Image (cartoon, helix red, strand yellow):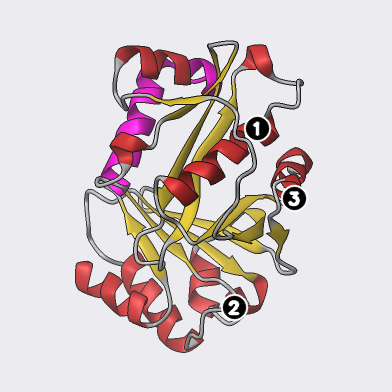
Amino acid sequence: MDELLKDLKAGGVHSIKSDSVIILEIFQDERISPNKVDYLINRLLTLDESSIEKVKLECPQGILDKLMVTRGKMKVIGERVIFKKRFAECENEKVPPFEVWPLLNKSSIAFLSEVMNFTYEQTETFLKTMKSELPEQAEKMFTVYTVNSEPAGAVFPHLEPDRECEGRIFWIGIHPDYKGKGYGKNLHLIGLHRLQYDFKAEKYLGATRADNAAMKKVMAANGCIQESNSVFSLEYSFSE
């Protein structure tokens, strides 16, 4: 499988592999050979790897239309829009207060479970999956926005592996007690700040559902520019 993922990378397909999921990305600016990529993804979907449960793909419509086999095997589960921002050398916008919490501490998991509306066990699994995907960064990602010294939300900034100092946000969310107060912009701004200064990212790429007007407004407010082309999210489950 690792050799196959290397071949996909050489063909312009970025990937992240966890214990149970493989995530593939193809963006509009990638130069790819659709026939070769289609062949390689098909090989991936026919591998007998008992530990891998799902393969996910993010792909623009124009490229997806050329991946005939992939399109036939994978299920479209959503559409997302892409926002980008290149960090200036001196961005000194005042950043709201925040703390970096230990990843798998009980209080960290308990707080995040309230933010995500997950059970404690589901939240712990989410964090462990994140750690398996980003093992070298996970311990410094859990960033908590505080309002009057109380935790109000969480954001998980990181550098995307093999993407030339490109910053991403793994997950972001406001606690239910603080929703509807306009804090989303502050939380996202904290994530951008940490990407630039703590993770040394040179640029940011963010994605959100095409119908998520609130998140699109937040990214635009923080100086991110929406790309003209959206991407489709596809999924293949080995159990189906």
Q: Nearer the viewer, mark 2 or mark 3?
A: 3
Residue drawn at point x = 57 percent, y = 55 percent? 90
Q: Which residue is mark 1?
A: 186
SS state under label 3:
helix
Q: Is residue 22 above or below residue 175?
A: below
Regarding residue 236, the answer to whether it shows in the image is: yes
The residue segment tinted magenta is 113-133
Secondary structure, magenta segment, majority class: helix
Given residues 110 and 18, the one toward you in this image is 110
In front here: 202 or 63?
202
Mark 1: amino acid: Asn
Residue picked out by circle 3: 220
Query: What number is the disc on residue 63?
Result: 2
Position of residue 47 in the picture relative to residue 127 (left or right): left
Q: CA distance from mark 3 to mark 1?
A: 13 Å
> Residue at left 77%, top 44%?
217
Amino acid type assigned to the residue bearing label 2 in the image? Ile
Image point 45% across, 47% down: which residue? 197
